[in-house]
Image (cartoon, grey):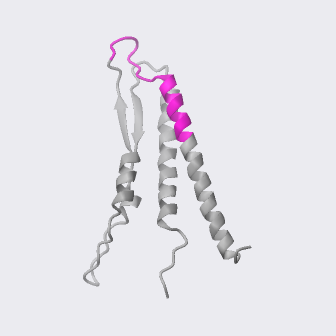
Amino acid sequence: MANFNLIDSTTRILQKSLDLREQRQQVVAGNIANAETPGYARRTFEFEKRLQAVIKRPQMPVPVLHPKHFPLGGSSLERLQGEVTRQPDRSGIGDGNSVSMEDEMLTLSENQILYEAGIKMTKRKLQMLKYAANDGR
């Protein structure tokens, strides 16, 4: 029997992107919640460059050479994680809080738009599967 997967690599990439965008949303929400906290260092959540690298060079599966060997971990996409960094206030002016509400709202809006686009693409892929499963009806 042929190896048949309903979930292709594009769908897995979309799923991972949505998961990472959700994590970014939480980081931005934390920044907004602490916008008035003295000494709070703004946090950023970056993952796009890592995701692009995984898409360009997906890891080839490591062959199991002996029946008693364990296969190594999942794909590099499954292991992909974002990176949270802190950006302390370096201006020396004010209370040491580095959160800019304008920047956070911009990041929030951009992340929301890209999240919704990912949802629409995923929905479209699932509609195509449904169409194929119903013999084109």
Q: Is residue 37 above or below residue 68?
A: above
The spot of residue 41 in percent (x, y) is 39, 26
Residue farthest to the left, as pictured: 65
Q: Please say whether residue 70 is one of the residues in the magenta stretch.
A: no
Q: Nearer the viewer, residue 78 or 95?
A: 78
Report which quarter residue 91 is drawn in: top left
Residue farthest to the top, as pictured: 93
Report which quarter residue 42 is drawn in: top left
Q: Specify whether 135 is left or right of 12.
A: right
The spot of residue 69 in percent (x, y) is 27, 78
Task: Please say whether residue 26 is visible from this viewpoint.
Answer: yes
Q: Residue at x 30, y 75 (%)?
A: 70
Q: Is residue 41 above or below residue 59?
A: above
The spot of residue 119 in percent (x, y) is 59, 52
Q: Nearer the viewer, residue 34 or 118?
A: 118
Q: Residue at x 55, y 72 (%)?
A: 6
Q: Residue at x 36, y 60 (%)?
A: 76
Q: Residue at x 51, y 74 (%)?
A: 5
- Read off the magenta span: 91-112
Q: Specify whether 9 is left or right of 124.
A: left
Q: Is residue 46 above or below residue 81?
A: above
- Quadrant that contains the C terminus: bottom right
Residue farthest to the right, as pictured: 137
Task: Please say whether residue 79 is visible from this viewpoint.
Answer: no
Residue farthest to the bottom, as pictured: 1
Q: Please say whether residue 106 is one of the residues in the magenta stretch.
A: yes
Q: Is residue 90 above or below residue 130?
A: above
The spot of residue 62 in percent (x, y) is 29, 72
Report which quarter residue 44 is drawn in: top left
